[in-house]
Image (tube, rainbow, N blue to C red):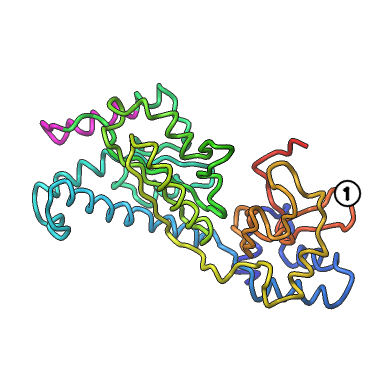
Amino acid sequence: MVDHKYDSYQGFQPATRFHVALLNWLSQFPTVQQRQTAYRFVKERLIFVSQREMHHLVSLFLPIIEDLARKRVARLLKIPLFETWREQNALARLDLLRRRTLYVGLSDGARIDVFRRYNEGLVSNEQVVAFSEISADKWEDLQSELWKSLALYGPSPYKDQFEAVCLVDDFSGSGSSLIRMQDGKWKGKVPKFYKANEGRIGTQLAEGCALHIHHHLSSDQAKRQIEADLRLFAETHPKFTYSWSFSYVLPADIVVQAGDPDVDLIALLKDWYDNKIEDDHTGRNIWFGYKDCGLPLVLEHNTPNNSVALLWAASPNDGRPRMKPLFARRKRHSSNG
């Protein structure tokens, strides 16, 4: 596993390898029992998603969108789903829908470049945007290229407007960064995109535009929260229609939480915890990770803060206990305090 996965972690310093990080990590624990508990956790419960595995999850995205597109065309034409494989009007409508779909990355981890390369010839460069904050000039460029593409289909009643937008991200641990109700207001990436682009309905975006949210990987907790919050959000934000999907959802039974049968592990997570690792973003008492997600998860490019803190947290130099990370995390948010 070290050769196959762990050494490829991008958070390691140059010339650093996993076995050195492991020895350094285990050395922080003063007792043999604690070291054995920590080692057992890594050996038996750690989930490490490699680059190859993440790319495979990315490759599953377009087939999901293709299935949704066929169902949409079947509803619009009021035909059985199987007819979309042979009925000429359905095939033509499906081609138009494919071109009138826009793919938008929600973060730099969305692997939108990998998605584009995997689907060369099926998705054009003019259908892919790396970031969700799209300028007015960029929208005009996208629409102009869409108009040129639609002209190749000949006369058509369909305008040069996108009828589907896919918001894409790599991983969701809690679902809160995507959408959440906070202080009586909707916050997160979906409400932000809605607010920025609801005025484009009827110009760059078609009436009834479908907004589809996809994650390549998700925890079970995030999946449930995203589904519930998007349903509530849709009730008061009707300018889009909403759907969501996941290439893979981690099973709920991997979670480390209070009541876990490994009582030694729970004791270690709490006893060897330094509250100096906390900041305004993480909140308090995050030995089970942000939002108590309790994931034993490491992604090759970074470790989510939804994972148990013992894996990724590093104490400041002036504190004890001195938490040392096994897979050091690169923070996306700076501390305000």
Q: Is residue 147 above or below residue 19?
A: above
Among the 4 quarters of the image, the one containing residue 312: bottom right
Residue 180 magenta-drawn? no
Quadrant that contains the C terminus: top right
Query: Horizontal and vertical percent for residue 76?
Result: 17, 46
Quadrant that contains the N terminus: bottom right
Instruction: Provide the residue designation for mark 1.
Output: 317
Q: Nearer the viewer, residue 217 or 257?
A: 257
Side of 206 where 169 appears, left or right:
right
Would you say residue 10 is visible in this rendering? Answer: no
Residue 145 magenta-drawn? yes
Give me the residue at 29% from left, 46% from top. 121
Query: Horizontal and vertical percent for residue 288?
Result: 69, 60
Query: Horizontal and vertical percent for residue 185?
Result: 53, 36
Highlighted magenta segment, given as a residue range: 142-157
Side of 172 where 324 appears, left or right:
right
Give me the residue at 17% from left, 30% from top. 151
Count numbered badges in the picture: 1
Would you say residue 121 is visible in this rendering? Answer: yes
Side of 81 where 41 appears, left or right:
right
Q: Nearer the viewer, residue 160 or 256?
A: 256
Q: Amino acid at mark 1?
A: Asn
What secondary structure predominates along the stretch shown in magenta? helix
Label 1 residue SS: loop
Spot the residue most to the top.
137
Q: Is residue 31 above or below residue 193?
A: below
Give me the residue at 44% from left, 25% from top. 135
